[in-house]
Image (cartoon, rainbow, N blue to C red):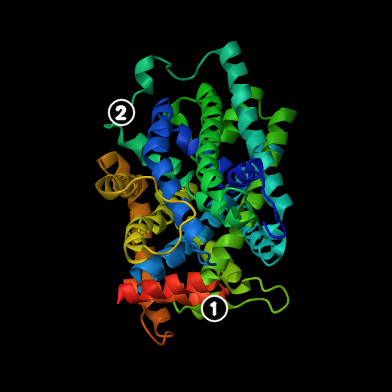
Amino acid sequence: MSGSKKFSFASVVLSVICVVFVAEAAAPAAAIGNQQFFWWIFLIVTFLLPYGMVVAELGTTYDSDGGLYDWVRDALGDKWGARVSWYYWINFPLWIASLATLFPPILGMIFNVELPLLPTFLIEIVFVWIVVFMSFSKVSDSAWILNGGAVLKVLIAVSVGVMGIWYAVTHGFANDMAPATFLPDLANTSALTYLSIILFNFMGFEVVCTFAKDMKSPERDIPKAIILGGLAIGAIYLFAGFGIGVAIPADQIDPDMGMIVAVATMVGQSSPIFMLIAVIFLVTLFANMASWSFGVNFVADYAAKHGNMPKVFAHENAKTDMPTGAAVVNGIVASAALCLQLIPIPAVSEGIFWMLFSSNVVFLLIAYIPMFPAFMKLRKVDADRPRVFRFPFKGTAMKVVIAIPAVELVLAIIATVVPFNGDEVAEKAPILVFCIVIVIVGEIVRRLSAKGRTAEFAGLTPEVAAQRLADEAEDDGCSFESLENAFAAVEKAR
């Protein structure tokens, strides 16, 4: 959000919604059925709130360009910093590839044609490289991209919900609406698979922390913005999910085309309303990738400069300072991922969207797991650093509240990639193998990248943290009293 100097509370909430809300995630979440209402509320309380409070404290305490990567590296050292940077980055080209697979079939529905494999593949590749070229420019950080894309995404979601109400009144519900269907069914492993999508929909709330310096009361407004933004996003998804569930039985919802198919079912594929929503949906795919590219590419660039990612990621355009190296690698990896659909295995070629999208979700969730132990360590070794906002729990209560979302992330990942019965093997086995391969590649990349470092950073100790605090105070030209306190912290650490 470059160029902005003042942010009202409303602007901060809207900016969070702009970055976090993902329209294409509505269908997989709706596939849970009426249980999604329970799970959204449950995960808002047990995941979003503690996760939001953690990123609120870390984001307002540590002013850095690396964000999540920096927090983990500061606490746990280069080894885990490199892993987080890899997982955080690799999710993005997989995400680009998954969205590219949506483009041809939606175009086919608009023009009422069925595209053969070769034209489909070419359209997907064109989508990928348009996203790459968009990320070469600072337009990817422009407010009109963020705000315009968000308005269109919310417009689609609300439209689907409104049409759902109309469809329910005129045609009835496609799903059983008995009260028992709203309760969670832990035996339904197919539904539990999509819980990772709800967690994925909460990721990215740390963006609000970047506005701390431009807010009147960040210690008050940041947690409020995270909570209200999360509730707003949850409400939007549920409204869209209701619209999808009205038209299509939950067990028949396609995780990739569910929203578009629901609109076609309700108003007809030849309807101008369907065509308008389909076109707007395609536009939002570009806006979504453009807005995310700015943050993801710069984190990869920043990590590469610390020897935790390959040097190619540190290449920047001399005129714009944009991380073009990361952008080009995004295009290459996304294009290679799309080649998987050329493999003559139905589970891979026919389920390419869900395979790529679920893998993208898995690696983004993995990237956030180390943040929770990192938070606990930074609280301990860097206790003297001033904190604009502090996590509201202490001691054992804090450990329990923080452990819960970390465990939820692990369980959601397991539910997404591990087959629990024979019926799930065909769908989940390719995803599991694909994710294992990416983890192994990540470990190889981490070791190769480490050869460019002169020393291995093992993480902050109380002494190093206190010395850093004193150096920062001196560099910032703080008062004598502030410097005295900072150097006192150094002596205390020793």
383 to the left or right of 116:
left
Q: Which mark is residue 185?
A: 2
Residue 25: percent from left, percent from top? 52, 41
Q: Kindly identify the amino acid type of the residue bearing the numbered disc 2.
A: Asp
Q: Is residue 324 left or right of residue 395?
A: right
Q: Position of residue 122 (x, y in %)?
A: 63, 58
Q: Is 60 located above or below residue 494 in the figure? A: above
Question: Which image quarter holds the N terminus?
Answer: bottom right
Look at 51% across and 66% down and name the residue there: 66
What secondary structure is marked by label 1? helix
**What amino acid does circle 1 point to?**
Val
Res 86 → quadrant: bottom left
Q: Which quarter of the rendering shows the C terminus?
A: bottom left
| Residue for badge 1 | 312
- Left or right, residue 358 beside residue 224: left
x then y, percent, for residue 7 = 67, 49
Residue at (58% x, 41% y) in the render: 23
